[in-house]
Each structure stands twice: as C-alpha cells, then as structure tokens.
Amino acid sequence: MDEGSQQAIEILKEYVGIIFARCIVKLSLSRSGLSFDSLGSTEESRLLGELDVGLRNYIRCPDKRQECRGRLLTLLRRSSEKATSAKDAQLNAQSTTIPITEESDIVRARMAGRTLCRELGFPVSIQIRVATAISELARNIVQYVGRGTIVVKSIRQPKLGIEVTAHDNGPGISNLSTVLQGQYQSQSGMGLGLLGAKRLMDFFDVQTGGPQGTTVTIRKYVN
C-alpha cells in the first residue's frame, strides 16, 4: 500500500482495530479504483464516500464516526494537494529537444509533441493540430536551412499547455510580414509552413534575422 493508505489505516485502527482498518481501506480503494498518492482534487469525495461505507458498518457511535471521518477528510485533502504538486512539478520538468537535420527527425518531433499533449489532457483533435504545426516548423528547417532544433515542453503560465520552439541559424526571413499575410509563396512552398502553424495554435511568435537566425515559438493551451 502507498503512504496515504498506511496513514488512513493508522487513523482507522484507533476506532475499529487494525484488521478492520485494513479491510476498510482495501475495499474502499478497490471499489473506487483510486489511490491516496495519486488522488485528484475532484476524486476526494468519491473515495471519502467509499470510506463512509466502512465507517457506518464498523463504527456505531455517531460522534466517533464523525470524528474519524473528519480526520480521514483532512488526510484526503493533504494527499490530493501533495499529488497535485508532484504532478505539476513533473509537467514543469518535461522538456524534449529534438535535433532536426532530416525527414525522420520531423516524425520524432511530431511524436514528442503529440505524446506531451496526451499527457497534458488535450483531446485527440488538438493533439493532431499540435503535431501538424510541429511538422510544418520542422519541415521548414529541413527544407530551407538543413539544421536546427525543435524544443517541446509543458508550461504552466500564462495557462497550462504545450510550448514548441523551433530554432535555426539560417539567414532569417526577409519578407516575414508578407509570408504571414499569406501573400507569398516560393516555388518550393515556403511560407505555407509558418502560416499553417500560426493558424493552428493559440500563440505564435517569430524572431528572425541577424546572426541569431530564426526562432519560432508556438503554444497551445489546455483551456
């Protein structure tokens, strides 16, 4: 059992003994399909409801039952806060850098973006949009510069979402405004990738020109 379950047993055994305490916790977790150490804030009441069944069955005194319930509720809320903080830290730490030099790297970057989107809770339709935008940016690097990077990471500010940064050390885009207005297209299709990525995402920014090359940053927010 996880740490939260052990703490629940320690609370319950003061009222019903160790055997019944273990039974209540085990059955409650089984019926709810939840875990103390990965408990979401919206799941607290569901697990508490299962624990209530055991309390009613094994604690006859209403006052003692209410006291025990209050202590378990405090534990549930503390466990939920801890699990949420751990999840936030994990999401904040997620960052993947994919070197882009050939066509196969486009697929790798696309997959990295879609995987992170799935972990963040994006619906499939949005996962596909983000993956498509990443493909456009990565393909631009391969076709027009030959070498660069795609960085895929989770963000919490200004909102929960995914941020993708495409960078290359090429000469830059001299006619950026024309490209983004959809009024320019080279024989090889240059411009469609940037414009397509912009239309698919919630945030779009381009820094280009000079020795730093071009950096494109796009974001998609969960809500």
Image (tube, rainbow, N blue to C red):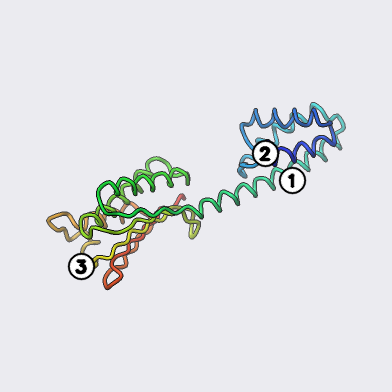
What amino acid is labelled 2 in the image? Asp
Q: Residue 2 carries which label?
A: 2
What amino acid is labelled 3 in the image? Asn
Q: Position of residue 202 (x, y in %)?
A: 38, 55
| Image quadrant occupied by the N terminus | top right
Left of 73 or right of it: where is 161?
Answer: left
The earlier-in-sequence mark between 2 and 1 is: 2
Residue at left 45%, top 52%? 161
Left of 10 or right of it: where is 205?
Answer: left
Q: How far apart are marks 2 and 1 (CA)?
A: 17 Å
Q: Residue 216 carries which label?
A: none
Q: Where is residue 88 in the image (x, y as percent from the top left)?
A: 55, 52
What amino acid is labelled 1 in the image? Thr
In the displayed structure, 19 sits above or below 188; it is above
Q: Distance between the residues labelled 3 and 2?
A: 58 Å
Q: Position of residue 11 (x, y in %)?
A: 80, 39
- Disc 3: which residue: 175
Toward which corner of the image does residue 179 lie, by quadrant? bottom left
- Disc 1: which residue: 74
Q: Where is residue 130 in the image (x, y as percent from the top left)?
A: 36, 48
